[in-house]
């Protein structure tokens, strides 16, 4: 079964939704993923950008993993959150002691992700922890990263503890992927964008698919 997380939009509120397929052609939509959690308390919040945790099998396939017995995803745009599920359809976000969303990663003043931290491709469970690739946006004011253009989207990585998935073990201070080519720096989004979304392991290589200034789709390749 293939699972796709996507953002639905009613011109008012973006909502994170799920769909599934057996053949990648015919899809079943399951609706907003937070509709039933906590009696629907988070059904109508703005939500997007999910990164389900995956693992690599011995035969080189990337499959959805369980973390501490449950399916798990990192999600969010303004901050990074965690949600868990038993069926990949209905998801329960983690909350703090006051019942609000429990953010675990936030923007950092003076860094490439000073304005937002938005989850990217599926996270990967490794021997060293869970690797999450995410998109960071630079601020427009004096609190931005001076080494990146204002408003630029670049990509970072965070390593989480596999036993305590909300615990950050390490985080890149500089983006590992940023706008450099002309088609990444100019387009519908004039400030420059490499917006990472898809990650595929195929024949010994990683293929990272990304948006280029909201005008093209590119792919970067890295050996496994």
Image (cartoon, rainbow, N blue to C red):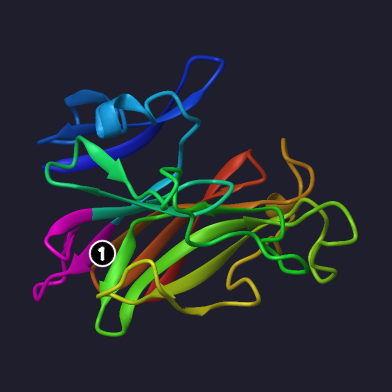
Residue shown at 10% from the left, 36% from the top: 22
Q: Is residue 98 magenta?
A: no
Task: Say whether residue 66 is magenta.
Answer: yes
**Label 1 belongs to which residue?**
202
Q: Nearer the viewer, residue 10 or 105?
A: 105
175 lies above or below 91: below
Q: Position of residue 62 (x, y in %)?
A: 20, 62
Q: Quadrant of residue 31?
A: top left
Q: Which residues are magenta?
A: 53-71
Is 107 rendered above or below residue 129?
A: above
Left or right, 10 with reference to 91: right
Q: Pick the residue in front: 14 or 186.
A: 14
Percent from the top left, x then y, of residue 120? 46, 54
Looking at the figure, which quarter contains the N terminus? Answer: top left
Query: Residue 194 versus residue 138: which sits nearer the camera?
Result: 138
Where in the figure is residue 51, as x and y percent of width and height?
36, 52
């Amino acid at each position: 079964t293939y699972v796709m997380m996507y953002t639905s939009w009613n011109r008012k509120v973006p909502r994170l939704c799920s769909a599934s397929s057996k053949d990648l052609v015919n899809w079943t939509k399951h609706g907003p993923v937070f509709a039933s959690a906590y009696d629907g308390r988070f059904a109508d919040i703005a939500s997007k950008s999910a990164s389900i945790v995956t693992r690599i099998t011995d035969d080189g396939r990337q499959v959805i993993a369980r973390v501490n017995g449950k399916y798990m995803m990192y999600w969010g745009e303004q901050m990074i959150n965690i949600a868990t599920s038993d069926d990949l359809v209905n998801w329960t976000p983690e909350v703090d002691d006051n019942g609000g969303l429990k953010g675990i990663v936030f923007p950092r003043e003076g860094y490439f992700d000073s304005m937002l931290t938005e989850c990217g491709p599926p996270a990967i469970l490794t021997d060293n922890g869970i690797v999450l690739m995410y998109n960071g946006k630079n601020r427009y004011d004096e609190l931005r990263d001076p080494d990146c253009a204002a408003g630029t989207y670049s990509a970072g990585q965070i390593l989480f503890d596999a036993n305590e998935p909300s615990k950050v073990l390490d985080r890149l201070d500089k983006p590992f992927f940023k706008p450099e080519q002309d088609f990444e720096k100019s387009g519908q989004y004039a400030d420059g964008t490499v917006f990472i979304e898809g990650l595929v392991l195929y024949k010994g290589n990683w293929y990272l698919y990304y948006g280029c200034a909201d005008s093209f789709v590119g792919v970067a390749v890295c050996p496994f």
